[in-house]
Image: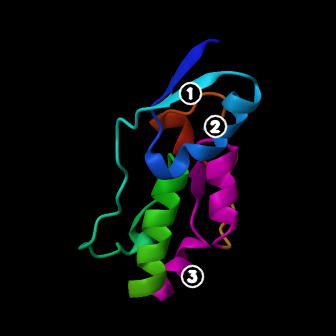
Amino acid sequence: MSKVLVTRPRHQAEPLVSALEQAGLSVVRFPTIEIRCLEEWTPPDVRCFAGVFFTSVNAVHCFCEQVRRDAPDRLVDLRSASVWAVGSATAAALEGYGLGTEPLPKLADAVHLSRH
């Protein structure tokens, strides 16, 4: 039986571990990082930015939960901002907060994103 090392954070590993085990693989859980949201920060005024770029589901939850708790009016402002997401899971997480996303251009660098 082949062994697979799963390095995802402990709280996010289970779906992958289950799928691998169902495929007949032996899994070793070895989380290499722990993801925690910052506890003390002030949500920025998103109206001061041309847009917001989320790179992970974790970033979405950490940011949006803090904003929802400490500055809910800024979550409303975020709904009218340009928001980009890396990946469909990140976009889906944003949708859960009522946030739509801009399509990523084929070349997603600062020059091309600033044109949107």
Determine the image quadrant of residue 26: top right
The disc placed on residue 27 is: 1
Position above or below: 16 against 37: above
Q: In the displayed orientation, state which residue is furthest to the left.
A: 40
Residue assigned mark 2? 16
Position above or below: 112 against 27: below
- Cβ–Cβ under 8 Å for marks 2 and 3: no
Q: Is residue 65 left or right of residue 2?
A: left
Q: In the displayed orientation, state which residue is furthest to the right.
A: 23
Q: Between marks 3 and 1, how big is the CA–CA gap?
A: 43 Å
Q: Between marks 2 and 3, how big is the CA–CA gap?
A: 34 Å
Mark 3 surroundings: few (<14), some (14-19) or many (≥20) residues within 10 A: some
Residue assigned mark 3? 76
Which numbered disc, 2 or 1, marks the residue that appears first in the sequence? Answer: 2
Q: Which residues are magenta?
A: 72-97
- Image quadrant for the N terminus? top right
The residue lying at 50 percent from left, 64 percent from top is 61
Q: Looking at numbered disc 2 in the image, what kind of residue is underneath it?
A: Leu
Q: Is residue 97 left or right of residue 24?
A: left
Q: Position of residue 3 (x, y in %)?
A: 56, 17
Q: Is residue 95 magenta?
A: yes
- Cβ–Cβ under 8 Å for marks 3 and 1: no
The residue lying at 70 percent from left, 45 percent from top is 88
